[in-house]
Image: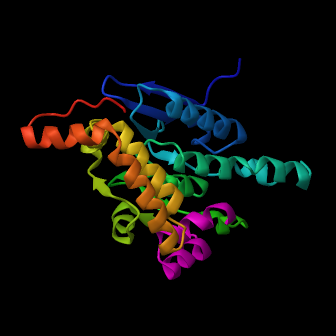
Amino acid sequence: MAEKLVRYAVDEEGVAFVTLDHPRTRNALSDELLDDLIEALERARDDGAARVVVLTSSHERIFSSGGNLNAFADDRTAVEKYAGLDRFPRLFKLIGALGKPVVCAANGDVLAGAFGLALACDLVIAKESVRFGCPEINVGAFPFMISALIYRNVDRMKANELMMLGDLITAGEARGLGFVNKVVPDEDFDAEVAAWAHRIAAKSPLLMKLGKDAINATRDLALHEALDALQAQLALAFTTEDLAEGVRAFREKRSPEWRMR
């Protein structure tokens, strides 16, 4: 059996840690690693013990170096290469439809295709020392697949600058551009990620799923279509016991007991 390139573990508070674990290649997003990552995320989606997913890396300095450069110039036919490109769309769609929040814990540089992976997540927490960017143009490539995510998260002119110049930016600059939620000193990073993840895991998993499903279904709709869909989702939320329990707990000044129904 081939060695898994992605590790999966769930702690006692419902945080599923999905860890890119191929440091020899700086977690290059090879077909094999992407397959393992998709499998791990599907496992988290179906795991009743998992309430939130933290996506991180075992490498000391690199979250992921992005797409596997060796695959760009190998001798496979164009048809074979095209067939393998479905992994990125499947991965990004899976994160959106996971029904559970996904936190990118950027503990190392987030480069090229991995930049798109971070942008597909719901929240991004970054070490102060890390950099973000899509340097593909510097090796004669272009960030085709992730450009759709970049344009949805970064101002158009800055997005063009990132893709056309290929320069990297600091975590602080990324925070200023709005696609990193928090920048944390390196020595405090693990504790801060755990604190965020445990806070999310303490929320109602059912209402979190309904909310994330609503966001995923409506973010690209016209306003009137989005409002109609959101009205229906809110009406569904009103039928849940968890919503009523949350209100009771707030009034009674106690911690809620989520029943997932």
Check residue 157 for magenta coloring.
yes
* Relative image position of residue 63 (x, y in whole percent): 49, 46
Q: Residue at x 34, y 40 (%)?
A: 240
Whether residue 147 sits left or right of residue 189 in the image: it is right
Q: Residue at x 62, y 26 (%)?
A: 4
- Quick one: 146 or 136, which is closer to the camera? 146
Q: Is residue 256 above or below residue 180?
A: above
Q: Answer yes or no: is residue 104 visible.
A: no
The majority secondary structure of the magenta stretch comes to: helix
The quarter of the displayed image where residue 143 is located:
bottom right
Q: Quadrant of the C terminus?
A: top left
The quarter of the displayed image where residue 56 is located:
top left
Q: Answer yes or no: is residue 164 visible.
A: yes
- Quick one: 87 or 111, which is closer to the camera? 87
Check residue 5 for magenta coloring.
no
Whether residue 54 sits left or right of residue 160 in the image: it is left
Whether residue 69 sits left or right of residue 173 in the image: it is right
* Relative image position of residue 121 (x, y in whole percent): 47, 51
Q: Is residue 34 above or below residue 160?
A: above
- The residue most toward the bottom is 157
- The residue most toward the top is 1
* Relative image position of residue 185 (x, y in whole percent): 26, 50
The quarter of the displayed image where residue 193 is located:
top left
Q: Is residue 154 above or below residue 16?
A: below
Q: Is residue 94 above or below residue 133?
A: above
- Quick one: 43 or 167, which is closer to the camera? 43
* Relative image position of residue 20 (x, y in whole percent): 53, 37
Q: Quadrant of the N terminus?
A: top right
The residue segment tinted magenta is 144-167
